[in-house]
């Protein structure tokens, strides 16, 4: 069975020959340090990888490693606009993105942190006038169609396209700052509404541009919004349903007019109570399925929502088991999650979010070996 068919079987809630596996994507890759550890552990020649996402410091994994781990999915961001290039200031170890958001990586740090939010001190009128990047910039798709067309015809992988910004809430706080956005939720809801509307409008334009070029070639389209933390939601369900849910529904509806690709929604944290809302707005796939978060028990999720959505992730806990457990602990964890999520399809195996920097390489290897061996349906 081809990788593409295997993944589509899972999304259609059918059992394939084995559970499909994702490794190397925006939320399913690994930190540069963990990647270096795996390559050294396997005694392979080191080749400096490209960075997939500068903010998270995750890598574009080598094809040889992806094949070894059984990865069934390939994808990328669209290209940057032709009027902006990512430039890292070597003295500050910082960069400014096309939105004017500044990022800084501290000495000894694993990731880049947001160092400046361009709208943190802005008034409502200033927010309304702030110039957003052009979602229709031709540079975003200049080479994209040829790349995805070739992947579609020359490989049998399932193809996904990733969004380079966070969701409506997440990108609002990247622009405004999380503290200021919380103040707005308490006392200035006009700002919440304005930012949500503007970010949603931009994303609809962005997807119109991108999917006009590659909509016929992709099987999965990634959107999302981080709405939860370890123990609950980042803000009230009422705020979500009034300001963010309608905008996310609009974005998803606009995407579905441009492609038959399935909607992969990335949403971290303890989001159990919002899953019915996410199903209602049209998601097909939930990622990363943060199984250690409150209320996110794998068996419970499968029982309650397994007929409505595909779980993409949830294969091994990266907070405790994967970095600190023994290889046997990892094997047992993977077996449990497969037992819970895999019956009847509707499961794509991946670690819960990206593999972190301090993860032992032998644990990474045993995670994927177990998924390949134990994840067979027949």
Image (tube, helix red, strand yellow):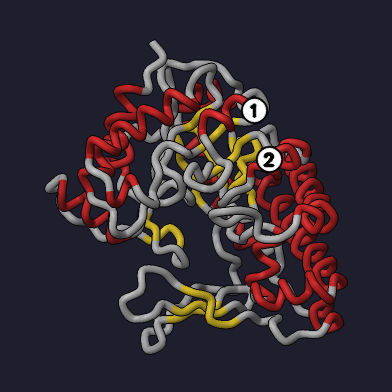
Residue positioned most to the left: 43
**Residue where numbered disc 1 is placed:** 304
Q: Residue at position x 38%, y 10% from top? A: 378
Report the residue at 70% width, 78% height from top: 180
* Residue 15 visible in rendering: yes
Whole-percent x and y of residue 73?
45, 37
Q: Disc 2 vs disc 1: Cβ atoms closer than 8 Å?
A: yes
Q: Marks 2 and 1, how far apart in space?
A: 10 Å
> Which residue sits at x=39%, y=80%?
106
Left or right side of 203 for 84: left
As drawn, 354 above or below 216: below
Q: How many marks?
A: 2
Residue 114, placed above or below residue 354 = below
Q: Earlier in the sequence, mark 2 or mark 1?
A: 2
Q: Position of residue 225 (x, y in %)?
A: 65, 54
Callout 1 secondary element: helix
Q: Circle 2: is it few (<14), some (14-19), or many (20+) Cα within 10 Å?
A: some
Where, quadrant-wise, is the N terminus in this rendering? top left
Give x and y (percent) for residue 102.
55, 80
Q: Quadrant of residue 160?
A: top right
């Amino acid at each position: 069975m081809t990788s593409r068919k295997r993944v589509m079987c899972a999304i259609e809630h059918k059992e394939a020959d084995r559970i499909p596996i994702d490794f190397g994507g925006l939320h399913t890759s690994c930190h540069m340090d963990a990647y270096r550890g795996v390559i050294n552990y396997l005694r392979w020649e080191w080749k400096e990888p490209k960075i997939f996402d500068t903010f998270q410091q995750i890598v574009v994994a080598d094809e040889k490693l992806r094949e070894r781990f059984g990865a069934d999915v390939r994808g990328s961001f669209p290209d940057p606009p032709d009027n902006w290039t990512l430039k890292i200031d070597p003295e500050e170890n910082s960069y400014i993105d096309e939105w004017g958001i500044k990022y800084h990586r501290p000495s000894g740090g694993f990731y880049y942190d947001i160092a400046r939010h361009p709208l943190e001190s802005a008034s409502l009128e200033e927010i309304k006038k702030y110039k957003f990047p052009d979602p229709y910039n031709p540079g975003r798709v200049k080479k994209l169609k040829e790349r995805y067309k070739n992947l579609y015809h020359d490989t049998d992988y399932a193809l996904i396209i990733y969004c380079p910004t966070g969701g409506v809430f997440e990108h609002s706080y990247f622009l405004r700052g999380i503290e200021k956005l919380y103040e707005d939720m308490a006392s200035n809801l006009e700002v919440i509404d304005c930012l949500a509307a503007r970010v949603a409008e931009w994303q609809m334009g962005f997807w119109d541009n991108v999917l006009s070029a590659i909509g016929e070639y992709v099987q999965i389209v990634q959107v999302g919004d981080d709405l939860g933390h370890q123990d609950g939601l980042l803000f009230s369900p009422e705020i979500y349903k009034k300001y963010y849910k309608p905008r996310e529904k609009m974005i998803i509806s606009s995407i579905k007019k441009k492609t038959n690709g399935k909607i992969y929604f990335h949403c971290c944290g303890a989001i159990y109570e919002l899953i019915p809302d996410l199903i209602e707005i049209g998601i097909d796939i939930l990622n990363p399925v943060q199984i250690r978060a409150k209320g996110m028990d794998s068996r419970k999720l499968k029982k309650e929502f397994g007929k409505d959505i595909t779980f993409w992730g949830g294969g091994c806990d990266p907070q405790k088991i994967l970095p600190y457990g023994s290889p046997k602990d990892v094997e047992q964890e993977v077996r449990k999650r497969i037992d819970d999520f895999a019956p009847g399809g509707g499961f794509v195996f991946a670690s819960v979010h990206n593999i972190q920097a301090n993860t032992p390489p032998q644990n990474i290897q045993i995670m994927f070996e177990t998924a390949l061996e134990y994840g067979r349906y027949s």
